[in-house]
Amino acid sequence: MARYNFDLTGKVAFVNGASRGIGAAVAEGLAARGAHVICASRKLEGCAAVAKSITESGDSAEAMACHAGHMDQIEAAIQHVRDTHGRLDILINNAATNPFFGPSADTPEGAFDKTIDVNLKGPFFLCAQAIPLMKDGGGGAIVNVASINAVEPGHFQAVYSMTKAALVNMTKAMAKEYARDKIRVNALLPGFTDTKMTAVFKANEDSLNTLLDENVPMNRMAQPDEMVGAVLYLVSDEASYTTGAQIIVDGGYLL
Ligand SMILES: NC(=O)c1ccc[n+]([C@@H]2O[C@H](COP(=O)([O-])OP(=O)(O)OC[C@H]3O[C@@H](n4cnc5c(N)ncnc54)[C@H](OP(=O)(O)O)[C@@H]3O)[C@@H](O)[C@H]2O)c1
């Protein structure tokens, strides 16, 4: 087999938050390199549409509902992967939420709990469920989708930023713990990307242009598919000596 081609033939991948945005682009990218991709998120319909588009282009995918804040759904999802495929090679923890923009002191407790549950507790326990299955298969690769806000907290986004910083630390902790089981754990830190999550910024074109001009050397948002190459690297054998790393894809924002 040719080397350095990011080949994922025969691999089984689970992408949470695959119904749109970055997760959908990553699911398509993994499938295009040969993986069978399980597209998951809260709402089955969105995932079914992504899986359909993947299979219509000749690649392999299926859809499943998995709420990242519900332990029973996390356990059931990974059990389904075990029962159906007998292995899991790739886990992408991409699902996240950001329900409250505002001063820290005004954060409603419900928004705090939801952000922690979906952005941190869910990824932690998806890893916890996935790791034994990966071990049984001889190893695996996990990518946790964090954010530039893990490094520089976003204005009025304290809890979201806290979860992303913790996700990076979780990545390092698990990378150390499971390296000898041949499980690599890495993080992607996207910058400002054109998805539903950032739609609020696009509502006002003038303020968006100022924001980009003042903060992003490339002076534009990323498109979701610009995140895919870094993920393909991290989950492929080309990254066989890469674990605990953070790949920042931000158009220069953090410079
Ligand atoms: N866009 C950016 O500028 C940016 C920057 C840095 C980091 N990120 C990170 O990139 C990742 C993807 O974000 P995006 O920009 O692509 O956002 P998006 O378009 O809003 O997509 C979010 C995805 O997460 C899923 N999701 C939301 N809540 C969920 C839950 N409780 N359980 C399971 N799935 C859930 C959504 O599907 P359902 O609604 O069907 O559940 C959707 O598939 C996130 O981790 C985000 O924090 C984004």
Image (tube, helix red, strand yellow):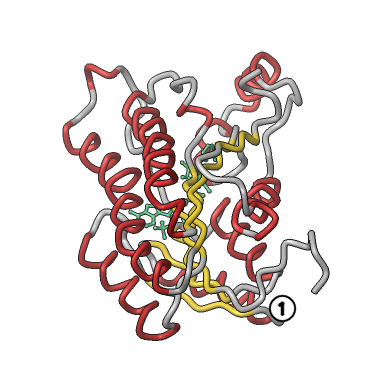
Q: Is residue 19 left or right of residue 105?
A: right
Q: Quadrant of residue 195?
A: top right
Q: Quadrant of residue 84?
A: bottom left
The answer to whether residue 179 shows anywhere in this view is yes
Residue 161 coordinates in the image, percent (x, y): 39, 28
Residue at x 50% of width, y 78% of height? 62
Note whether ligand 1 is within 8 Å of mark 1: no
Residue at the outermost front position = 180
Q: Is residue 125 left or right of residue 196?
A: left
Judging depth in this view, the residue of 252 and 98 nearest the camera is 252
Residue at x 35% of width, y 44% of height? 119
Amino acid type, mark 1: Ser
Residue at the outermost bottom position = 84
Judging depth in this view, the residue of 71 and 11 nearest the camera is 11
Residue at the outermost top position = 214
Residue 184 coordinates in the image, percent (x, y): 50, 52
Judging depth in this view, the residue of 60 and 127 nearest the camera is 127
The answer to whether residue 47 shows anywhere in this view is no
Above/below status of 252 relative to 116: above
Above/below status of 87 relative to 74: below
Which image quadrant: the C terminus?
A: top right
Q: Secondary structure at mark 1?
A: loop
Number of marks: 1
Q: Residues within 10 Å of mark 1 (few under 14, many from 20)?
A: few
User: Dot 1 corresponds to which residue?
Assistant: 57
Which image quadrant: the N terminus?
A: bottom right
Residue 54 coordinates in the image, percent (x, y): 64, 74
Residue at x 30% of width, y 57% of height? 128
Residue at x 49% of width, y 75% of height? 48
